Image (tube, coloured by chain):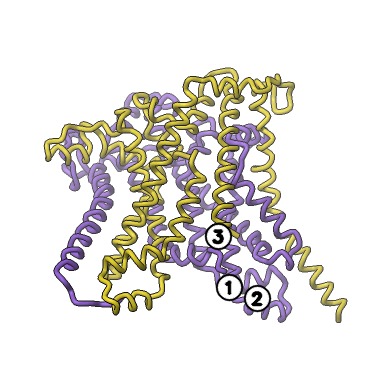
């Protein structure tokens, strides 16, 4: 950046700009601070609109209640399950599919046919209802596989990875092939170790995608015992549809309607993302930029 | 010698095809097989009779139901209005903040703001709606309490039909603008720095440099992202709208996807067929829009996805 003399107009601009950006950042952070404050406050103060960014009547009662909420933790575990399964399956499929597709059409006969076969699925779909009928027909209702299998071929992630492979120096894989490596060895020993930004990006997208999914959880399950976390949150916290969730006990319902309890549930469900985000966020920008087509 | 190379090439080709098998099989089962389900739209599908049972064929009946339904055009209208609002705001906001952030000298400050602003993108709409419903509440929400300091009466952001669409648009972009902002920042970083130097020597100040170098430098990216976003015209954001929708704002808030889901949830005997019919029309229009936008960006911006 070239520096010139700091004129008054520029100084004013810098001050205002900084102020605007700081204010905006504080606003964003404030949303979460407010939520956390709610979760640690006494319910009376919450109802009395007295909470802004600091808890009043600091206590852990919402979280203590939450620990006893077996349904919440059951759904939490289901979401963890689908994230782990989904990540393993997706990553495996992305890697072994991106490798052949990264070859040119001349090197790999039929490459374009395969590519369009997969890409078309992003342009058009039969809709959620035929998918539901299929899942039902396969007997996968209420099965974790129903939440994991349909999204096992994430075409955009495959595209990201194949572009990344293409942008790697050809000399790497060529040298390996001359040494007698077959395709699997080239992929595992050469390409994957060089693709960490892309893998980190795809990991972040996949984990977040599975953690945040709620609609398939609503469509492919018949009881709250099988809800992933977001579906539970959607039903119990947002829509407060206790009947649909099969919750009838009045004391349980009143504790769930408690504002501090709602806030606590939301805070806890953000924790995994908060954990994963800082680690993978670094690779993000380079992952996306390098995963695009270069001419 | 030639024979062994040929054998190697042959082997390679087989293994490449083998590597494609898992993706092809799964895509076939879970993406292409359900496409057969489009036929439900032309039947009066009764689930009890089963997938291959003798369903009654009714031709275009479900589509007639849809097009003559008094809800149809208002719902399409809501969808388009909300989408266009999101496309416009979603183009302007990231650019403005990318430009502002670009003027910041401190790398640490820049990085911190990026990290903070980017984070909501990774939250689910279920969680973000939970936060929004809380802070936008007319009685106890932070936003109205803040406005109350200035003597502004409480605004029913989510409960008033007149405010609902704008609330949806604005909150959606607050959550998402970080994503495109990062892309623009990366593009700006790619602009040749000698251009800036030459302009400074010629006496151009900060504002002129932004207008004549930075903006034109990302012009292609702006066009690209804008056209690609057009393909999503009929996707007004199901997750968000479903979480925030309530009975008081159905007239302005119901979008195509929520209508589809709501049709499915009713106890109407033909809900499968009706839902599928609406979904099919939406899928076809989206297909045309998205393909069109990719074709356009390919021809005009030389954009190749793969």
Chain bearing mark 3: B
Question: Is residue B141 shown above or below A148?
Answer: above
For the colour purple, the matching chain is A
Label 3–label 1 contact, CB within 8 A: no
Mark 2: few/some/many CA within 10 Å (<14, 14-19, 20+): some
Helix, strand or loop at label 3? It is loop
**Chain B: drawing colour:** yellow
Distance between mark 2 and mark 3 Cα atoms: 27 Å
Q: Residue at x 25, y 71 (%)?
A: B205
Distance between mark 1 and mark 2 Cα atoms: 9 Å
Closer to viewer: mark 2 or mark 3: 3
The answer to whether marks 2 and 3 sit on the same chain is no
Q: Residue at x 48, y 55 (%)?
A: A205
Residue beneath label 1, please? Answer: A168
Residue beneath label 2, please? Answer: A173
Give the quadrant of residue B143.
Answer: top left
Residue beneath label 3, please? Answer: B303
Label 2–label 3 contact, CB within 8 A: no
Give the quadrant of residue A97.
Answer: bottom right
Question: Is residue B131 shown above or below B45?
Answer: below
Helix, strand or loop at label 2? It is helix
User: Of label 1 and label 2, which has the lower sequence position?
Assistant: 1
List x then y, in percent, for residue B86: 39, 44
Instruction: Specify the quadrant that holds the N terminus of chain A.
Output: bottom left
């Amino acid at each position: 950046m070239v520096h010139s003399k700091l004129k008054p107009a520029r100084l004013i601009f810098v001050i205002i700009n900084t102020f605007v950006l700081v204010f905006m950042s504080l606003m964003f952070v404030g949303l979460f601070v407010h939520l956390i404050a709610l979760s640690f406050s006494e319910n009376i103060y919450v109802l009395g609109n007295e909470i802004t960014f600091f808890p009043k009547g600091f206590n852990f009662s919402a979280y203590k209640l939450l620990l006893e909420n077996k349904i919440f933790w059951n759904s939490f575990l289901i979401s963890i399950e689908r994230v782990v399964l989904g990540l393993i399956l997706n990553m495996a499929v992305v890697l072994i599919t991106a490798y052949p597709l990264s070859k040119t059409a001349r090197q790999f006969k039929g490459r374009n046919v395969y590519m369009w076969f997969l890409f078309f699925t992003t342009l058009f779909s039969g809709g959620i209802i035929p998918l539901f009928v299929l899942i039902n027909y396969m007997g996968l209702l209420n099965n974790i596989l129903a939440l994991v299998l349909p999204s096992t071929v994430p075409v955009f992630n495959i595209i990201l990875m194949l572009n990344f492979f293409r942008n790697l120096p050809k000399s790497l894989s060529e040298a390996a092939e001359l040494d007698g490596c077959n395709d699997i060895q080239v992929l595992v020993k050469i390409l994957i170790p060089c693709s960490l930004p892309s893998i980190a990006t795809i990991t972040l997208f996949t984990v977040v995608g599975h953690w945040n999914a709620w609609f398939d959880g609503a469509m492919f399950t018949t009881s709250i015992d099988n809800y992933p976390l977001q579906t539970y949150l959607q039903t119990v916290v947002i829509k407060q549809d206790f009947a649909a969730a099969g919750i009838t006990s009045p004391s349980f319902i009143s504790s769930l309607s408690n504002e501090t309890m709602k806030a606590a549930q939301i805070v806890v469900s953000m924790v995994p993302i908060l954990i994963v985000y800082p680690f993978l966020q670094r690779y993000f920008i380079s992952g996306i930029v390098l995963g695009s087509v270069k001419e | 010698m030639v024979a062994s190379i040929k054998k190697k090439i042959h082997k390679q080709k087989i293994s490449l095809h083998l590597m494609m098998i898992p993706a092809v099989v799964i895509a076939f089962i879970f993406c292409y097989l359900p496409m057969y389900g489009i036929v439900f739209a032309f039947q009066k599908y009764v689930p009890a009779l089963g997938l291959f049972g003798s369903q009654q064929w009714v031709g275009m009946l479900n589509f007639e139901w849809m097009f003559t339904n008094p809800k149809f055009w208002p719902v399409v209208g809501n969808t388009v209005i909300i989408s266009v609002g999101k496309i416009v705001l979603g183009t302007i906001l990231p650019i403005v903040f990318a430009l502002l952030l670009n003027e910041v000298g401190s790398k640490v400050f820049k990085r911190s703001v990026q990290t903070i602003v980017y984070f909501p993108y990774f939250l689910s709409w279920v969680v973000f709606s939970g936060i929004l419903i809380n802070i936008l509440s007319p009685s106890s929400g932070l936003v109205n309490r803040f406005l109350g300091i200035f003597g502004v009466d409480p605004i029913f952001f989510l409960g008033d039909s007149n405010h609902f669409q704008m609330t949806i648009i604005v909150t959606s972009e607050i959550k998402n603008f970080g994503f495109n902002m990062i892309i623009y920042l990366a593009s700006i970083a790619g602009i040749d720095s000698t251009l800036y130097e030459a302009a400074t020597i010629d006496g151009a100040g900060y504002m002129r440099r932004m207008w004549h170098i930075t903006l034109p430098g990302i012009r292609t990216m702006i066009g690209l992202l804008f056209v690609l976003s057009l393909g999503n015209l009929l996707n007004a954001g199901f997750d968000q709208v479903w979480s925030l929708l309530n009975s008081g704002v159905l007239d302005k808030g119901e979008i195509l996807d929520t209508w589809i889901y709501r049709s499915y949830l009713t106890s109407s005997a033909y809900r499968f067929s009706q839902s599928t019919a609406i979904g099919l029309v939406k899928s076809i229009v989206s297909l045309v829009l998205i393909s069109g936008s990719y074709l356009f960006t390919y021809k005009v911006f030389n954009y190749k996805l793969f």
